[in-house]
């Protein structure tokens, strides 16, 4: 367990629900104290005004201003396509290091391997934590997660950046409030920053992706938890991120899925050209891929991110999805996850009975 820190989040020019995914996730779920957000385009506002949650955390225009709130960590709060360090961020990172702030980054570009940044960090005796650096002792998947004691649920999506981590964390927290032991498996940089452990799956060589997911699931299962919520990545038909999704499915060997979507989105991000298939077609795809010889997992519910819709539009689309699919539908932030919780509790009881009846 990491000690608690005071964090300033760097999200220059990008601080919004979809523009700063890492910042949003850490603000919503981290146990650390967020003391400031750095974005000169929104300086003078507070987080609540921009995101609709987060309270009175100030948004400031520079690292220098953020220092007034006594952070000990600068966290890079964006996850741009390609994962490179934006040129405009370099000066801010150097300034933070020189003021002896540790720097946490979920970029594919490793700060600790940048000669200038690494040398400055060594001189100032601060840590550069590259969250996306994978372990060295990687293993190939073997299907062992097929036989977990725990009920394993994987969040999957119609696209990338649709709320798979959010619904997994909301469900984990909801189960724990009921006294049911639940574990979250982080597979992306934001989840790792929140939970303090996990694997950066998109930084793992392809042959070892499923093995890393399997390892994480088996480690949680060995702890004796009742339910394991695995954070999904990408989408199975996404032209860029589909292989990561398949690796998660084969590594986690889930008992069931929760499907996540953004109703207003009709094409894959960041491609913006290829159309996303209809919802029922996506559901059949996820179920059919694993139905040939494994656990026959089903999509048990839908989590829709309606943050860009009005209340009336959101209610209408949730009702439409429920009518089209016959599944419980929610927006975790607008309606809570209680109806998903109910259907997953049924799945948990089914897993327990199967376990008792197995030879």
Image (cartoon, helix red, strand yellow):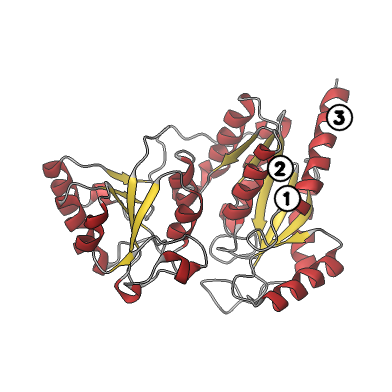
Q: Residue 177: where, in percent of width, then height? A: 66, 39
| As drawn, 38 above or below 276 | above
Q: Which residue is mark 1?
A: 257
Q: Which residue is mark 3?
A: 353
Determine whether the residue tagged by mark 1 lies in a helix, strand or loop: strand
Please name whichever residue, 161 or 50, is drawn nearer the observer in this view of the structure. Answer: 50
Q: Residues within 10 Å of mark 1 (few under 14, many from 20)?
A: many
| As drawn, 81 above or below 113 | below
Determine whether the residue tagged by mark 2 lies in a helix, strand or loop: loop
Looking at this view, name the residue that lies furthest to the front.
Answer: 56
Query: Spatial distance from mark 2 to mark 1, Cα to Cα?
Result: 7 Å
Q: Quick check: marks 2 and 3 in contact, CB under 8 Å?
A: no
Q: Is residue 278 visible?
A: no
Q: Residue 155: where, in percent of width, then height? A: 66, 52
Q: Is residue 196 left or right of residue 152?
A: left
Q: Earlier in the sequence, mark 2 or mark 3?
A: 2
Determine whether the residue tagged by mark 3 lies in a helix, strand or loop: helix
Query: Spatial distance from mark 2 to mark 3, Cα to Cα?
Result: 17 Å
Q: Residue 264: where, in percent of width, then height? A: 65, 76
Query: Spatial distance from mark 3 to mark 1, Cα to Cα?
Result: 19 Å
Question: In the image, what residue occupies the spot 74% across and 51% down?
Answer: 338
Q: Quadrant of the N terminus?
A: top left
Q: Which residue is mark 2?
A: 254
Q: Earlier in the sequence, mark 3 or mark 1?
A: 1
Question: In the image, what residue occupies the spot 14% across and 47% down?
Answer: 119
| As drawn, 260 above or below 277 | above
Q: Residues within 10 Å of mark 2 (few under 14, many from 20)?
A: many
Q: Quadrant of the C terminus?
A: top right
Q: Quick check: marks 2 and 1 in contact, CB under 8 Å?
A: yes
Q: Residue 298: where, in percent of width, then height? A: 80, 50
């Amino acid at each position: 367990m990491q000690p608690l820190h005071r964090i300033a989040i760097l999200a220059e020019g990008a601080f919004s629900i979809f523009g700063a995914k890492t910042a949003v996730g850490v603000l919503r779920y981290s146990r650390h104290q967020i003391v400031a957000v750095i974005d000169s385009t929104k300086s003078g506002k507070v987080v609540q005004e921009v995101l609709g949650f987060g309270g009175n955390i100030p948004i400031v225009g520079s690292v220098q201003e953020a220092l007034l709130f006594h952070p000990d960590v600068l966290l890079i709060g964006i996850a741009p396509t390609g994962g490179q360090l934006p040129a405009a961020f370099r000066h801010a990172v150097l300034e933070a290091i020189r003021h002896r702030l540790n720097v946490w980054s979920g970029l594919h570009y490793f700060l600790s391997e940048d000669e200038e940044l690494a040398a400055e960090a060594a001189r100032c005796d601060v840590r550069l934590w590259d969250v996306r650096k994978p372990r060295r002792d990687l293993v190939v998947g073997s299907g062992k997660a097929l036989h977990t004691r725990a009920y394993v649920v994987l969040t999957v999506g119609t696209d990338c950046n649709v709320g798979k981590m959010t619904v997994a964390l909301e469900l984990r927290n909801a189960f724990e409030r009921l006294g049911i032991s639940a574990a979250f498996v982080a597979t992306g940089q934001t989840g790792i920053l929140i939970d303090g452990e996990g694997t950066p799956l998109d930084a793992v060589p392809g042959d070892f992706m499923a093995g890393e997911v399997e390892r994480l699931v088996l480690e949680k299962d060995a702890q004796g938890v009742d339910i394991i919520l695995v954070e999904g990545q990408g989408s199975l038909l996404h032209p860029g991120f589909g292989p990561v999704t398949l690796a998660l499915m084969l590594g986690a060997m889930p008992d069931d899925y929760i499907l996540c979507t953004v109703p207003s989105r009709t094409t894959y991000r960041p491609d913006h050209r290829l159309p996303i298939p209809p919802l029922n077609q996506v559901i059949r795809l996820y179920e059919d891929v694993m139905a040939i010889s494994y656990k026959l997992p089903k999509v048990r519910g839908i989590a829709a991110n309606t943050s860009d819709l009005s209340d009336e539009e959101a209610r209408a689309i949730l009702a439409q999805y429920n009518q089209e699919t016959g599944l419980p539908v929610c927006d975790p932030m607008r309606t809570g996850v209680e109806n998903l919780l109910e259907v997953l509790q049924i799945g948990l009881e089914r897993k327990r009975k199967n376990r008792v009846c197995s030879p």
